[in-house]
Image (spheres, rainbow, N blue to C red):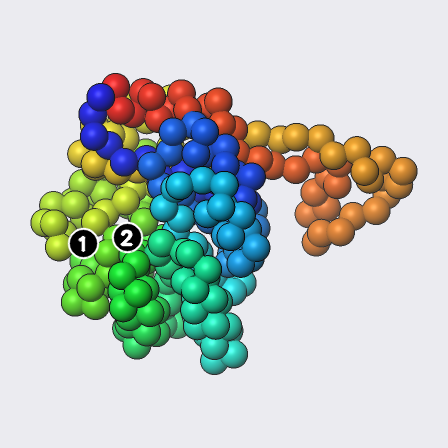
Amino acid sequence: MVKRLIEVCCGSADDVIEAWKAGADRVELNSDLFHGGLTPTVGSLRVAKRETDLPVMTMIRPREGGFRYTDAEFAVCLEDARALLENGADGLVFGFLHPDGTVDRERTARLAELALSAGKDAVFHRAIDVTPDWRAALDVLIRLGVTRVLTSGQAPDVSWGAGTVREMIEYAAGRIQILPGAGITPQSLERVLRETGAGQIHVAIHRTLPDSSTVNNRSIFYGGCLYPPEDRFSVLDGEAVHGLITRAKA
């Protein structure tokens, strides 16, 4: 088998357990995957660490909709980061930008220092995909000692940005890890691996399960104006992930 590292994007402790059963090497733990992933609870991390032996990267993102946060939101990020590290997180995943989309060096440095001083990974997430100059962004992150960058190659789907990901890997030249992710499917897997030349990938494959507890009143919705159905929820598709991992390492 090829030594490729497979990180699986998870939205719950149950997802982490499924990823572990499927053969994942590492997971990124979030809440609210619908909005791209927000900070998970300490409880979900503790259960994930108790039930599996996987390295767990924890998202630090206080809200959806961009990466320029208020002082209070950033204070929340710091508090969440400390709590998650104290409860077993193996790394922090974060991204802070200025209003013009360039990397917020000061805030990034503070989160990176929290992780690195604890001997954990510091991961800059797909905020890099909206920066005006990814080379300049990588230069900042490399100087700060960031471990890894998750990216789709500044494309909506990494299969469209594979060429840019390869350029990132070549530009990084081992100074920082480049982790391609976003939209990798069993159908696009081989092409993404071939065209990026990456030694690790980030995947997310989920399925929908029913929850009949809301059946008594189908006119009630607890979400926003999109009104997602309340009688189902999303979980990691362990069987599909296992198949993808097996193919990726074959």
Gap between marks 2 and 1 measured at Cα = 7 Å
| Residue 58, x across and y down, in percent | 43, 54
Image: 47 above or below 72: above
Q: In this view, does 148 lie to the left or right of 155?
A: left
- 65 and 58: which is toward the camera: 58
- 163 and 231: which is toward the camera: 231
Image: 33 above or below 163: below
Image: 99 above or below 200: below
Residue bearing mark 1:
176
Q: Are marks 2 and 1 in contact (CB under 8 Å)?
A: yes
| Residue 100, x across and y down, in percent | 35, 70
Q: Which amino acid does label 1 sit on?
A: Ile
Residue bearing mark 2:
149
Dot 2 lies on which element? strand
Q: What residue type is labelled 2?
A: Val
* Residue 121 showing in the rendered view: yes
* Residue at 45% across, 34% down: 19
- 179 and 19: which is toward the camera: 19
Image: 139 above or below 10: below
Quadrant of the snapshot with the N terminus: top left
* Residue at 28% across, 52% down: 149
